[in-house]
Amino acid sequence: MRAVKKTSFPTPEDAEAAFYEAIERGDIEALMEVWSDDEEILCVHPGGPRLSGVEQVRESWAQILKSGQQFKVHLAGQVVVQGMMLSIHSLHENILVQGESRPRPPVVVTNVYQRGTAGWRMIVHHASPSSQPGGTRADPPPKTLH
C-alpha cells in the first residue's frame, strides 16, 4: 500500500521547483512526492532506457541520488504549454556536480505534469543530451508572413 501524498502542489511550477530542490538535496522521498502514484508514469535519463511505473522510476532516482554527489541544477530556456489538466515544460538543465572541474554537457528535458485532486504531479520526465552548447536556445527562425 502506498503512502498518501503529504504535499499539494497548487501549480505545475511549484511541483517543478520541488522536483529540482529534491535533486539538489539528494532527497528521494521529496523527489517521489512530486511524482504521481500512477503506474503509467515514465522517466528517461540521458542515454538510458524508458522506465515506467513508480517502482522503476523510484529505483532509478535512488541509484542517482545514493552516489552522494551534490548536484546544482540551473534551468534555462523554459517553454511551457499548459491546459487545464496538463502542463508540458521543455527546458535545458545545466548540471554542476560538486567537486568536478568542468560542467557537464547541458540536457534537454521535457517534464509533464498532470492536475489531480491533490494538485499537480509529474507524470513524465524525459532527458536527452543537448547539441546546443550551454543549454541555450538557438535563435528562432525569422517569421514569414504570407
Image: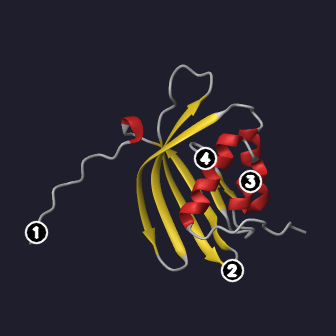
- The quadrant the N terminus occupies is bottom right
Mark 4 or mark 3: which is in front? 3
Q: Of tags 1 and 2, which is closer to the observer?
A: 2
Determine crowd level at label 1: few under 14, some 14-19, many 20+ residues with C-alpha closer than 10 A: few
Q: In this rendering, is residue 70 above or below 117?
A: above
Q: Which residue is mark 2?
A: 117
Q: CA distance from mark 4 to mark 3?
A: 19 Å
Q: How many other residues sit within 10 Å of disc 4, few (<14), some (14-19) or many (≥20)?
A: some
Q: In this view of the protein, can residue 44 be seen by the observer?
A: no
Residue found at x 20% / y 54%: 141
Residue 73 in the figure: left or right of residue 37: left
Q: Nearer the viewer, mark 1 or mark 3?
A: 3
Label 4 close to label 3 by CB (< 8 Å): no
Q: Residue furthest top?
A: 101
Q: How is the image coloured?
A: secondary structure
Name which residue lies at 24% across and 48% down: 139
Label 4 residue SS: loop
| Residue 113 place in picture, x, y as percent | 58, 67
Specify the amino acid type for callout 3: Ala
Q: Nearer the viewer, mark 4 or mark 2?
A: 2
Label 3 belongs to which residue? 30
Using the rendered view, name the quadrant where residue 54 is placed.
bottom right
Mark nearer the N terminus (3 vs 2): 3
The residue where tag 1 is placed is 145
Q: CA distance from mark 3 to mark 2?
A: 19 Å
Q: Earlier in the sequence, mark 1 or mark 3?
A: 3
